[in-house]
Image: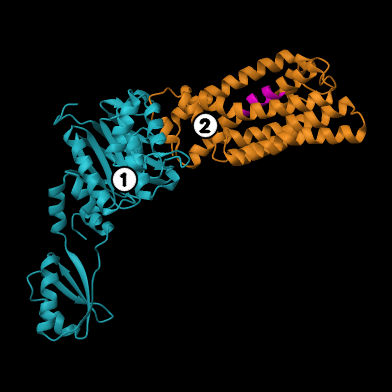
Amino acid sequence: MSSGTPTPVIHAEGLSRWFGSIVAVNDITLDIRPGITGLLGPNGAGKSTLIRMIAGLARVSSGEVTVFGEPVRNNPPLSKRMGVMLEHETVYGFMTGRQFVKLMGELRQVNPLDEAVERAIGNVELLEAADRKIRTYSRGMRQRIRLAGTLVHDPEVLLLDEPLNGADPKQRIRFQRLLKRFAAEGRTIVVSSHILEEVERIADTVVLLVNGKLAASGDFRAIRAALNERPYHVLVACDSPRTLASAVVQLDSVEAVKMDPAGRIVILSRNVRDLQIELPRLAQRHSVTLSRVVPLDDSLESVFGYLVDGGER
Amino acid sequence: MKSLFLLTLRRALSPTRILMLGALALAPFAVTMVMLAVEDGTAMADFEAFILNAMLAGAIIPLATLATARAGFGDEISDRTLANVTLTPYPRWKIVLPKLLAVTSVPGLAMAVTAGLTSYVAYGSDLAATWAVTVGAVAAVVLYSSLFVWLDLVTPHAVGIGLAYIVVWEGLFSRFIYGVRFLSLRSHSLAIAHGVDERRFAGEEHTAVGLSAALAVVLIVALFFHATRRLRTMDVP
């Protein structure tokens, strides 16, 4: 496995998938190179459909997708080089963890098998529970044994759909460390998530999907910088809104202030961090009691929406 | 292939299915015992028409096969574990074949035992007749399994359609509409049993033995190839 190759391992060209009148993935063209790529987007953005198309599990309505330059559909030998962990649970409760990983290895013609099974289970730190039935596992443990099953054939490409669902903070850190080690070995890893911070910690490159469309892709820092410049609306309820509004408008971190029909203040700010510090001080100085401070558009959808619209809304 | 066979076998042998198969397998034997006890010697024509034709070939075998055929692909589509077996380097026919063999072997064994025992008792230890009925039952299981495994791959409503097929097509149309028997799996299995022992099912309507055997082979091969093709082209959940 060579590291740092500039050649894209995964290439999608005009990729679309629709189900009846619903467009799940819309005309996506992208290249994914070795390293960790975060596939980010709110629920229903088309992440899982895109991963399933890259894995060859779902048909494409138009466009094409290749891995290592080969078509992914009807190409069973390619599955030896790919490890796919889908969002939903694909384990057999009646098996032990070890039996499951062994089965995955057998199905992928791994040789020598026992050694690979131990290594894969060890990688996810589940050796102690490996001989327990999977039905007795916690959700986080089931995720880990699935990951072991995905890793058992030592794939060059890993497609992981929401792999951290159900994982506790400790497991998340272990998982991040594991993925970074795999990436350093030259593997190509795609990790989907709807949690911005989660992807930020793992991935250097990010692909942003919104409503099935490619909203942005590239270096995470550049996208993060764009996010930092995004204006935020903050709702403030207090006992003296007019006093506070006239004081708040003087702050550098505030772009505009308006009152809503309920008499609360809506502040537009491009620097929420400074506003968080300055607002309580200002209220104290003017003897105003704050009863509520709520960010109005902090949802992931609004963040992605901002990126899609380029801050024009 | 062995792994897939064993995985499918494990699913086909779930406690619920074993109970269902046990109850279905016991039914014709129990009814035969009652008939023998009550009538003091069963009219062979009635036994063949009601127990073997209508009950065993027309209801018990297709129901047992429908239940176990789900272990082939239906269960894996429902619980979304099908990706585990399709994301493998195996050509698709090597996935369909062991699954088909596994889901055929379980009801095949159960139905062979019940058909063999029932006919052995009813025909007064006539081994040729017992062998004929057993072969016919196994042929029916292979035919129905091929059909229902294929059905699971082409529709999410395989159980409903399968039940409707058993009741409407095999239960009504093929018995009362001339010509439908050429497309009836029940009729072909009776013809095959008749071919093994000409005394058996002589009074029942069925197709010629050679034609039935040929049609059965064509059907099994066609369903197998289409199932393989379907597995290649379908969206794996």
Where residue B125 appears, as percent x and y from the top left, is 82, 20
Colour cyan, chain? A
Answer few, some or many: residues within 10 Å of disc 2's Cα (few below 14, many 20 plus, some between 14 and 19): many
Mark 2 chain: B
What is the tally of numbered marks visible in this picture?
2
Q: Amino acid at mark 1?
A: Pro
Q: Main secondary structure of the magenta part?
A: helix
Q: Residue tagged by mark 2?
A: B8
Q: Is residue A169 above or below residue A32?
A: below
Give the magenta range. Answer: B137-145
Task: Tell me if residue B177 can be seen.
Answer: no
Residue B118: % across, % down: 78, 28
Q: Residue at x 74, y 26 (%)?
A: B115
The image shows residue B128, relative to residue A249, as above or below, that is above
Front-most of A205 and A135? A135
Cα–Cα gap, marks 1 and 2 = 27 Å
Quadrant where the C terminus of chain A is found in the figure: bottom left
Placement of B54 over or under B139, stated as above or below: below
**Residue B142: % across, % down:** 63, 24
Q: Residues within 10 Å of mark 1 (few under 14, many from 20)?
A: many
Label annotation for residue A163 = 1
- Name the quadrant containing residue A293: bottom left
Q: Secondary structure at mark 2?
A: helix
Q: Is residue A180 visible?
A: yes
Horizontal side, residue B212 vs residue A84: left or right: right
**Is residue A202 covered in magenta?**
no
Q: Foreground: A105 or A281?
A: A105
The label number, if any, that marks residue A1 in the structure image: none
Q: Colour of chain B?
A: orange
